[in-house]
Image (cartoon, rainbow, N blue to C red):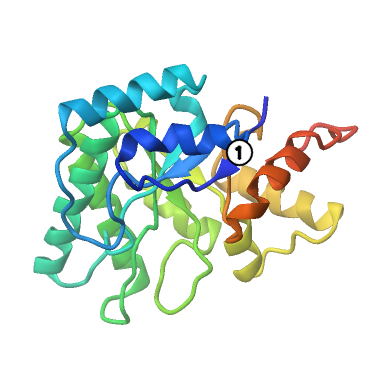
Amino acid sequence: MKYIGPHVSIAGGVENAALNAKKIGATGFGMFTKNQRQWKGKPLSSESIALFKENLDSCGYTADQILPHDSYLINLGHPEAEKLEKSRIAFLDEVQRVEQLGLKYLNFHPGSHLRVIEPEACLDRIAESLNIIIDQTEQAILLIENTAGQGSNMGSRFEEIARIIDGVKDRSRVAVCLDTCHLFAAGYDLRTPESMEAVWGAFERIASDPRFDRIPLVLETIDESLWPDEVSRLLNLNPPTEEPRL
């Protein structure tokens, strides 16, 4: 089964996420666990946590079908010690919120060197940040999202993601989220079957070999009125004659 859906609103509380996804026929969805443009969110109440889990169950979703995203403010590779620590504290809170909700994943942008430190040093700081967070949390899997490589953002090349993973001690706690828009913007050609195969082959050689089934596929289109039709169309696509390699 394909887990397909948009990034849904949590307006009124995280407990509304599953309800909003169900309304449009989504079989998977993305979400934030707090306001993504704030450093510190209001703690999740026991009531919200219980309602979130209840609605998840009543709507037929499991943790495998949900892809939470962290705050856009966090930079786990920040060159300044004070701001790096602020990001690590905020990221720890994000992971703890995911675990409180009984979810499995947390998707995040790796970080930026801000043209202050060398890219390699930034990648090593990101790995160090992940080690610190993993040591203080239980089981959430941290998904490194590839970036478009704009500015000084890291993670646009598979080799950069591989270096981060190489620096993580417990690699069972990290994985990769592939953003296809970011891939294309970073120069990975996805326009033909041949170029797609080349991209997936490069990813397989450097990172891992996942499949599209049983992982959340999150739409990032902006017109909410089109979501039900987009989800339906994607769920009803004919499978390829050969299993796609990722």
Q: Amino acid at mark 1?
A: Ile
Task: Specify the farthest residue to the left.
Answer: 82
Classify mark 1: residues with Cα within 10 Å, few (<14), some (14-19) or many (20+). some
Left or right: 203 in relation to 21: right
User: Visible in this render: residue 102?
Assistant: no
Query: Please, which residue is most extreme toward the right here?
Result: 241
Residue 79 vs residue 138, the one in the foreground = 138
Q: Nearer the viewer, residue 50 or 172?
A: 50
Q: Which residue is mark 1?
A: 24
In the rendered image, residue 75, in percent from the top left (x then y), is placed at 27, 63
Which residue sits at x=74%, y=64%?
189
In the rendered image, residue 62, in percent from the top left (x then y), is placed at: 47, 22
Q: Quadrant of the N terminus?
A: top right
Q: Is residue 218 left or right of residue 155?
A: right
Residue drawn at 32 percent across, 32 percent down: 140
Residue 160: image location, x then y, percent? 46, 59
Q: Quadrant of residue 104?
A: top left
- Looking at the rendered image, the quarter that the C terminus falls into is top right
* Figure check: 154 above or below 57: below
Image coordinates of residue 91 in percent, x first then y, are 23, 50
Disc 1 is placed on an element classified as loop
Q: Is residue 203 left or right of residue 132?
A: right
| Number of numbered discs overlaid on the protein picture | 1
Res 43 visible? yes
Q: Is residue 40 left or right of residue 212?
A: left
Give the answer, above or below, for where 191 lies relative to 228.
Answer: below
Whether residue 142 is situated above or below residue 202 in the rendered picture: above
Residue drawn at the location 80% of the way across and 58% of the way down: 195
